[in-house]
Image (cartoon, rainbow, N blue to C red):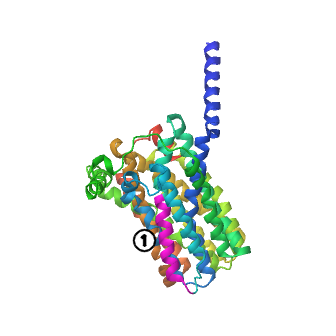
Amino acid sequence: MKENSGTNEVHAGKKWRNGIAAYTQPRVLQVLALGFSSGLPLLLTYSTLQAWLATVGVRRATLGAIALVGTSYSFKFVWAPLIDRVPPPIPLGRRRGWGVTIQLLLIAAILALGSCDPKHNLSRMAILAVVVAFLSASQDIVIDAWRVESLNKDQQAPGAAMIQSGYRIGMLAAGAGALFIAASAGWFTAYATMAALIGVGLLVFLFGPEPQVSSRTSDDRGSGWHVIAHAFNTAVIGPFRDFMHRPLWPLILIAIFGYKMGEAMAGVMSTPLYISLKFSLPEIATASKIFGFFSIVTGALIGGVVTTKLGIRRALILCGILQSIGNLFFVLQAMGGHRIGYLALCVTAENLTGAMAGTALITWLSSLCSPAFTATQFALLSSLASLSRTVVASSGGALSEKIGWVPFFILTSVIGLPAILLIAWIGPRDNISQKGVQQAV
């Protein structure tokens, strides 16, 4: 028995060492670089752009409407079949060709956005922000495809961890990093630096390998609109048709849409609140970006543990309630005024509880996917969840302007409760599988 026990311990130790060593493999490290490039553009058209516009006196209603720029992220599944099947303009292979093409355009668009003057070119800035978001969403399509096709079975889990880690680091650079640079060298320098950093992912596409998979371009099934129609039906209509066979599927969609709505509305107006309370850009960068980054990671890990222990349904309910309570800290901030301690507490509570709820939601969405349509259905369901951030939450600026900061944030703390009640009624009642845990974390 002792000999068998020792053998098992050696085998377990070897598996741990192999798992850690996987993160040092060149292909997995390339995924980290691509994740970094993927996370950079998001905040350049969201909170960082809001901070820029807020410092020059743009009205709150306009700041809230900035959230609409991110609509491309919610609908990227619509044009994903085209990128997947149509040959790229640059002949470097299907993935690398599209990756280089999109990233070169993305760099140019970010430079153009950073060169604008919001006092005189606000309309042009809005158009360029939409272009940046569209190219960023398109970049994500290519990066996800390259990652899945380039990594072998044993590298998929480390690759998933690396893409998320790189994404968070990219967001940190475009959030805290851009604000620090803007405070000392101006907004154009900040955006130009972010555009240059996209080159980290561009180097991977330029010098990295093309995935060795069978090509599925337009030549596979003819040409022209027939290919587009077939791709759209396969990628979009089929998964919807399959999902609609589920009992109470309309209520499931309503619950998904509303679950993160309150957190999204509060998040959209967090930076404008801090600016209105006379917090400086370095203060916001330190508390809201750097400190918030660690809160998000911690919250995601706690959410994974809670979901594992309680199951999806109870975790969704508990984390959803905590998420609503987290929004009440914005009320404390609005009433307390310019206090660094309140800012740190507010940022921590919002990001911690929001990440916990996000992990539970991702696990639920993963469990709802049919094996035949896992990737597409997850994209569709996650897009629906993000619509509350890009569409409904965009009204937060006008609403907070009309009713005031305190009533607004109280509203955000209760607006998600109907979705929680729906989940208590229709949510899954069995414990999640190990696969669901891995996808959530």
Task: Judge by depth and name the residue closer to the eye, 29 or 164.
Answer: 29
Q: Residue at x 42, y 65 (%)?
A: 387
In the image, which residues are magenta?
120-138
The reply, left or right, for residue 126 in relation to residue 422 is right
Q: Is residue 338 above or below residue 107?
A: below
| Secondary structure under the numbered disc 1 in the rendered image | helix
Q: Quadrant of the N terminus?
A: top right
Q: Residue at x 52, y 56 (%)?
A: 100
**Residue 236 horizontal/vertical position (percent):** 31, 55
Label 1 crowd (10 A; few <14 / some 14-19 / many >=20): some
Task: Judge by depth and name the residue closer to the eye, 39 or 314.
Answer: 39
Task: Judge by depth and name the residue closer to the eye, 271 or 247.
Answer: 271
Res 38 quadrant in image: bottom right
The reply, left or right, for residue 327 in relation to residue 287 is left
Q: Which residue is mark 1?
A: 392
- Residue 314 seen in the current view: no
Q: Of the residues shown, which amino acid type is indicated by label 1? A: Val
**Mostly what secondary structure, the magenta segment?**
helix
Q: Residue at x 27, y 53 (%)?
A: 230
The reply, left or right, for residue 29 in relation to residue 78 is right
The residue sitting at the bottom extreme is 120
Question: Does residue 135 belong to the magenta stretch?
Answer: yes
**Residue 248 horizontal/vertical position (percent):** 28, 54
The residue sitting at the front extreme is 91
- Residue 179 seen in the current view: yes
Question: Does residue 151 belong to the magenta stretch?
Answer: no
Q: Is residue 196 above or below residue 433?
A: below
**Residue 299 horizontal/vertical position (percent):** 59, 53
**Residue 342 horizontal/vertical position (percent):** 68, 69
